Image (cartoon, rainbow, N blue to C red):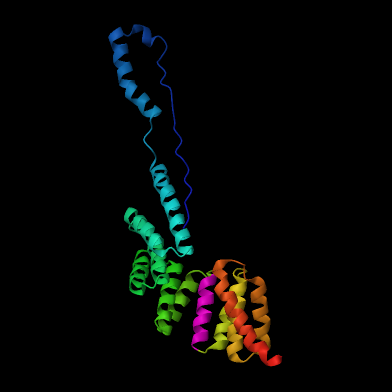
């Protein structure tokens, strides 16, 4: 959700020069008329009409602040408040695909799956190249057990943006749910190359190794995940899961 930078329009001011001696030959009434003719133009220079880019920036700034507030509410789990804020954004600008995709994600996180899929589809109607909306819709399909549709949407998201680390992770989880462990590991390894969310990726790849029977690889990934996962409330649930999976593997050794 980016703010485009705009270059402000330069005001060009000029002076009108009279030929030498012309002013002295004019009557006083003509001079007054000339002053009246030029006064409105001078007023416009002092109070210029805003450039369209400037007007767009003025609208974008409050929208950006409102969007940041909505995302912050969602991250804190205040889904109802976040949806209210996204409603305001969409009312202000009903053709912003990102706002529909983000509101759909909040609907999905709050258990309102039917509302979520409507927003994802609307986002893709507005912008068929929005990779995050394909990723979000794929998550919806996977939650519904519609795995083929999920994989297809993940593929589209990654074709549009190979740097979408979340799409790689989610695709790997879906392959793992389908017991396609080799494909799952491939997706997780592609995600690792992007250098982000390593703790999350090690946790999910470790689980794929675990289920495939590669216990040594699983233990190594679980230990890396515990070391890499940030100590934040958002990561606490995954950390507890990883510790539980690691205990399953280590208990027979004691």
Front residue of 45/120: it is: 120
Q: Position of residue 244 (x, y in %)?
A: 60, 82
Front residue of 226/150: it is: 226
Q: Position of residue 96 (x, y in %)?
A: 37, 59
20, above or below 11, in the image: above
Residue 189 visible, this angle: no
101, above or below 215, in the image: above
Quarter of the image holding residue 205? bottom right
Question: Which residue appears at 39% of the width and 81% of the height?
Answer: 144
- With 125 as the anchor, is 213 left or right in this view? right
Number of numbered discs on residues: 0
Front residue of 97/66: it is: 66
Residue 228 visible, this angle: yes
Q: Position of residue 198 (x, y in %)?
A: 62, 72
- With 112 as the anchor, is 131 left or right in this view? right
Question: Which residue appears at 50% of the width and 79% of the height?
Answer: 171
In the rendered structure, does residue 175 fall within the stretch colored magenta? yes
Q: Position of residue 235 (x, y in %)?
A: 57, 70
Which quarter of the image is occupied by the C terminus? Answer: bottom right
Question: Which residue appears at 34% of the width and 7% of the height?
Answer: 25
In the rendered structure, does residue 141 fall within the stretch colored magenta? no
Write down the region rendered in magenta: 165-178
**Magenta stretch prevailing secondary structure:** helix
């Amino acid at each position: 959700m980016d703010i485009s930078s705009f270059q402000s329009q330069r005001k060009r001011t000029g002076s009108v020069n009279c030929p030498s001696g012309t002013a002295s030959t004019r009557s006083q009434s003509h001079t007054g008329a000339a002053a009246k003719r030029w006064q409105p133009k001078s007023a416009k220079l002092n109070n210029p009409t805003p450039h369209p880019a400037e007007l767009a920036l003025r609208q974008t700034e409050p929208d950006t602040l409102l969007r940041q507030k909505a995302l912050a509410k969602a991250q804190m789990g205040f889904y109802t408040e976040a949806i209210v804020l996204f409603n305001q954004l969409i009312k202000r600008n009903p053709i912003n695909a990102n706002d529909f995709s983000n509101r759909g994600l909040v609907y999905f996180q709050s258990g309102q799956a039917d509302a979520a899929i409507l927003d994802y589809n609307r986002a893709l109607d507005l912008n068929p190249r929005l990779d995050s909306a394909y990723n979000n819709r794929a998550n919806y399909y996977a939650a519904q057990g519609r795995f083929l549709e999920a994989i297809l949407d993940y593929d589209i998201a990654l074709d549009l943006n190979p740097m979408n680390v979340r799409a790689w992770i989610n695709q790997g989880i879906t392959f793992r749910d389908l017991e396609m462990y080799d494909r799952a590991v491939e997706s997780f390894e592609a995600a690792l190359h992007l250098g982000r969310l390593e703790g999350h990726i090690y946790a999910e790849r470790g689980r794929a190794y675990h289920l495939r029977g590669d216990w040594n690889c699983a233990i190594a990934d679980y230990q890396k995940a515990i070391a890499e996962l940030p100590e934040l409330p958002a990561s606490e649930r995954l950390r507890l899961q990883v510790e539980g999976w690691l205990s399953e593997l280590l208990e027979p050794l004691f």
